[in-house]
Structure formats: C-alpha cells, structure tokens
Amino acid sequence: MAFFSSYASRSLLRRLPKLLRPSPLRRSLCAAAAGVERGGGGGASSAAGFFVDGAPSSMRGVVFWEPGRPLAVEEFRMPRPKAGELLIRTKACGVCHSDLHVMKGELPFASPCVVGHEITGEVVEYGAHTDNRIKERFPIGSHVVGAFIMPCGNCFYCVKGQEDLCEAFFAYNRAKGTLYDGETRLFLRSNGKPVYMYSMGGLAEYCVVPANALAVLPNSLPYTESAILGCAVFTAYGAMRHAAEMRAGDSVAVIGVGGVGSSCLQIARAFGASEVIAVDISDEKLQNATTLGATHTINAQKEDAVERIQEITGGRGVDVAVEALGKPQTFMQCTKSVCDGGKAVMIGLASTNVMGEVDITRLVRRQIKIIGSYGARARQDLPQVVKLAETGIFNLQKSVSRKCKFEEANSAYEDLDRGKIIGRAVVEIM
Ligand SMILES: [Zn+2]
Ligand SMILES: [Zn+2]
C-alpha cells in the first residue's frame, strides 16, 4: 500500500496539474490525494479504491490453468512493477495463435499463467528506482503499446542490437514465465499463489511491462485496433525487414493469411513489393487478403500453390515466401515457392519437435535461404511500426475483424482454434 500512497503523493501530485484529464482512475487519485471519499464505480476503481481505503487492491486477469480447461477470470493482487518496469492499465489485448499453442499444451509453458501478449494501455506507475529518462519517455497517463518480445537491454544479443534474440527473455519469460529477476508479478488475491506471465500477461486489467518493450502510442491511434501492433504487425515487420531484408520490387508470397500472415501482406506492400500473393485454404481469408493489398490469391485446397506461384512469377518463384502456419507441408511449400537465391522466411510456430523437410540438392545448388524469424526488435522496430499505423500506411481498422469483451476471451480463442477468425480478434479490457 505504500507504493500507491507514495505514488499518489510524489508522482501524481507533481504531475496532476499538467496531466489532469477526466479519467475515472485519475478522478479517484485526486480524491485520494485530497483525502476525500471516492464516488465512482467500474473496473478501474478497484485500483483507485486502494488509494482511498488503504485496503488491499486487486484486479481481474484471465488465467490458463491447464490444457483442456477453459480460461477463467480470477482475482489478483495489484501487480507491483520493479525498477525499469511500468504498471500499465491494460486497454486491449489481441488474440494470437501463440497463446493457443500454450493453451493446447503444444508449447510447454509454466502454469497457471496469464496469456495475452499484444497490448495497449495507459501508464499508471513506475517501479522504484526507474530511470528518469524512462519516466520522461513514458509520462504517467501516456498511451503505450507493448511488444511481445520484451528485451532486457543488457544481454549479449541486446547489446548487439538483436533484441529479438534477448537471452533473458527466453531464459526467464519463455522458459519460466517470469520477468528478469526470476519472479512473476502476478499473485492470486485469495491465497497469494504465483501465476506466471506469458510475455507481460496481457489479458488482465493491469500488467507489468519492462520499459524496453514499450513504445508511445499517439492519441490519434485507438487502443483496441492498436493492440495488434505488438505481435501481429511487429512479427510481420521483423520478418520483412530483418529476415527477408525486403527491397522495393520484390515479389512476395504469404502462406497462411490469418492474423500475422495478413499483416505480412500489408507490410510487404509498405516495403514496396511488386506482386503480393496470398495463399490459404479459406476463401473468406483470401477475400480479406485482397482488401489488404494481395495482388493474387491462391486457395491451396483447390489449386497447387507452388505451381500457381511459379505461373504468376514467370516460372521462377517469388523473391520472398513467408510461412505463417508452422506446418510441415506448408514449410515445404514455402521453400519450393521461392526463386533461385530466394528467401523462405518461417514465422509460424509448431508443436515441440515438429520437423520440416527440404530438398537438399536444390537448397545447395540454387542457394535457397531458409530463415527463421520470431518477432522484431522492440526499441528500434516498435516505434517504426507505430508510425506505419499512424500515417495510415498500415491499416489497423481493416486488420481487426472482431472486438470482444474480457469475459469472452475464452470463446475468442475457441473460434481462433476453429479457424473462424478472419483477421485478428482483440479483447477490449476497460
Ligand atoms: Zn502473438
Ligand atoms: Zn537481452
């Protein structure tokens, strides 16, 4: 409780005059600072109530307990950020296939955990001893977007600028479900049981995010649609910029045009692709791909995708093919779709130990490049991705096909699993 009262007395009283806006949280904070009772109700007031009553504060989060068990909304103690971390009042969180892999037990992850890893929200607090330059970059009340790869900033790869290979992220977050001191920030309200974090554990009313994973979201961009910037668009950008090293005029094929794949279409256009070929087995998704800039579509259930790609490209294949499904068959299709010297970029995750096959002799003689790409580099790429959305080069509105409520998160994942979500679903939190 000291953290909120000190936060209220120091940070807030100092910042309130210039940042005062009529949000419920801030109204309550003013009341708290003035020592008067709060009047408002609603989602955010549970946090604000803490300031007033001195009672333990709490929030709600969506918990994955074990494979086969539906996600459940649980009460949590209010999470506490540590140095270099920000407490974010989550506004929206995208529904991504990576979470589904965890929920289905296809990718091992610490449980129970809060899934959700592409978020937008509002900065409400800093961890103690957080650098002033971080506070200047992300003032209290500022809108932010979070990248799912949260770089530590100091490991071997982060120092080299390859934040998408951050050792701490993989060793702590992906392997243990914690932040980089080896601890989670999430504990159940009832018994204090630790709950692990898939990235920042975004499907909760508040989340703790290392500052290195955040970028400022301009007020012109909406919270809901912008949530997808932190994974779907971020991943597409990383694949095109760093893995494919795309150049204007390149021909591109994207195999699997769901959330991340359909983002690849728009990013490929942004990098100046000549042909953009969308491959899927759903006519609905292919129709949607056309509105996002695909110049050609192929339904791989009705036609031979590799043959069609060669036909479209004068018999040579594309300069860049992206595989966004993580299946052995499409992995092979992807390598066969590229021209000699072309780049086959793999961004689809598969279950542990799933193998892909490749024609070795063609790989060798025709200099086929197979490149894995997981995400992008938060500090250099996320601000660029935000700019693409801000300028309208990347159309967020067209990419988000469904908005749902916090309580509907489980059914959104069920629909994602059944292939019923055409673009991206986003959970609106408050
Ligand atoms: Zn994702
Ligand atoms: Zn690192």
Image (spheres, rainbow, N blue to C red):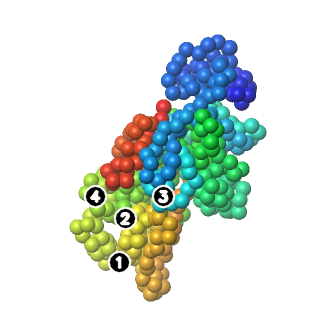
Measure the alpha-carbon separation of dots 3 and 1.
40 Å
* In the image, residue 73 above or below residue 275: above
- For residue 400, what is the image quadrant? top left
Q: Helix, strand, or loop for circle 4? A: loop
What is the number of the mark on residue 282? 4
Q: Helix, strand, or loop for circle 3? A: loop
* In the image, residue 100 above or below residue 207: below
Residue at the (43%, 52%) spot, across then down = 68
**Cβ–Cβ below 8 Å for labels 3 and 1?**
no
Q: Comparing marks 2 and 4, which lies closer to the viewer?
A: 4
What is the number of the mark on residue 255? 2
Q: Earlier in the sequence, mark 1 or mark 2?
A: 2
Q: Comparing marks 3 and 1, which lies closer to the viewer?
A: 3
Residue at the (49%, 75%) spot, across then down = 369
Q: Helix, strand, or loop for circle 2? A: strand
Q: Nearer the viewer, residue 100 or 376?
A: 100
Check disc 4 and give the amino acid type: Ser
Check disc 1 and give the amino acid type: Arg
Q: Nearer the viewer, residue 287 or 358?
A: 358
Measure the alpha-carbon separation of dots 1 and 2.
17 Å
Q: Nearer the viewer, residue 65 or 161?
A: 65
Q: Comparing marks 1 and 2, which lies closer to the viewer?
A: 2
- For residue 290, what is the image quadrant? bottom left
Q: Comparing marks 1 and 4, which lies closer to the viewer?
A: 4
Picture coordinates of residue 222 (x, y %)?
46, 36
